[in-house]
Amino acid sequence: MLAHPDDGIAALSQRLSLPEDTLRHCLDRLSSLALVRPSGQADTAFRVMGPEQAMNLLLARQQAELAAHQERVESARAAAAQLVAECSALRGPAAGLRAEQLTGAQEIRARLARLAAGVEHEIMTFAPGGAHTESDLEASRGPNAELLERGVTMRTIYLDSVRNHQPTLRHVDWLHQHGGQVRTAPSLPIRMIIADRNEAVLPLDTTDAQSGAVVLTGQGITTALCELFENTWQAASPLGPAVERDTNGLTRQHHEALRLLAQGLTDQAIAKRLGVSSRTARRFAAELMDALGARSRFAAGVHAVQNGWLPPNRT
């Protein structure tokens, strides 16, 4: 089609020795990838995207697909961990896995205090849910200082939304001064604390972390959870003063909001995942629609796939 731009269906079918129905199927596929469009000059001719532009578009889509696949893998790991936690609470742990169920906020706090007291090398934390209160942050400094003074490595991943919360930023500065490491991610799969790569604390109910938790000990499950943390840590950004934006002026929160919008989540659900208000989630949606030149959320999803911002749906 690049070499013979004036060929229509019949000419292409003859030139390629393909039945017309097979050729139309191929053209539909190319059209769905936005690589071929009907020409405005004739009903039977086509406009073909240039090779360099087409390759850049296809590579961008492949990168988006790989990112989406990685997200599905990490979500699956988190879902598996949550399932193990729930099943352990219902019928006891499987062979090789020890589970200790905790009920209520007071019991959870007491157990976390004992866990911290016994840590020797490292503690890794997913901290979803948005910004913590200033009083909670200040109360955590004493135990954190004690851990860091003992040489324990502390790594914490917050949501990107905390970058706009001054008390959290001051707390992070304090952690950095004492040797703690902090990064942020657009969203986190689950609330989690791992001590010495041996014990993991997970909530029994992801919607109410204070109602109950389970402490899991076992090489298989903790190895998987540590890998989940490490992969998320590598993709997360060190917490600094500036918010990084891509060439379209969008932040990682925008791209995560776009992915969640494409999954059909409501503004309220997106706000909860990102740790922001519903108003901010609506603002993200409006900014994404503006950046994509879309008048509706459905159109925004279509344009996002065409631009390589999202992978095409697989059926």
Image (spheres, rainbow, N blue to C red):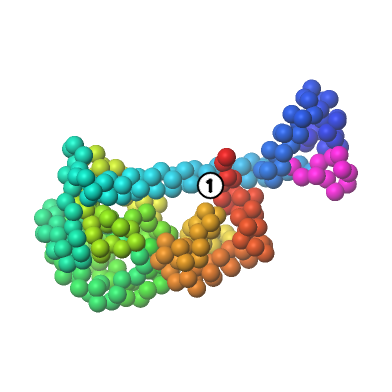
- Return the residue found at the far top: 17
Q: Quadrant of residue 190?
A: bottom left
**Residue 212, image x and y in percent?**
23, 60
Measuring 14% from the left and 54% from the top, which residue is drawn there? 119
**Disc 1 designates what residue?**
64
**Residue 52, image x and y in percent?**
67, 42
The image shows a total of numbered marks equal to 1
Point out the stretch of residues depicted in magenta.
Answer: 36-46
Q: Quadrant of the N terminus?
A: top right
**In this rendering, position of residue 236 left or right of residue 27:** left
Instruction: Say whether residue 269 is visible.
Output: yes
Secondary structure of the residue carrying numbered label 1 = helix
Q: Nearer the viewer, residue 49 or 111?
A: 111
Characterize the magenta stretch by its predominant secondary structure.
loop
Measuring 80% from the left and 29% from the top, which residue is drawn there? 20
**In this rendering, position of residue 16 left or right of residue 137:** right
Going by the numbered disc 1, the residue's amino acid type is: Ala
Q: Quadrant of residue 188?
A: bottom left
**Residue 161, image x and y in percent?**
41, 67
Sort mark 1 into few (<14), some (14-19) or many (20+) by Cα contacts within 10 Å: some
**Residue 182, image x and y in percent?**
31, 61
- Return the residue found at the far front: 91
Q: Nearer the viewer, residue 264 or 184?
A: 264
Q: Is residue 164 magenta?
A: no
Q: Quadrant of residue 314?
A: top right
Q: Quadrant of the C terminus?
A: top right
Measuring 88% from the left and 46% from the top, which residue is drawn there? 41
Measuring 51% from the left and 63% from the top, which residue is drawn there? 266
- Return the residue found at the far right: 42
Instruction: Say whether residue 238 is visible.
Output: no
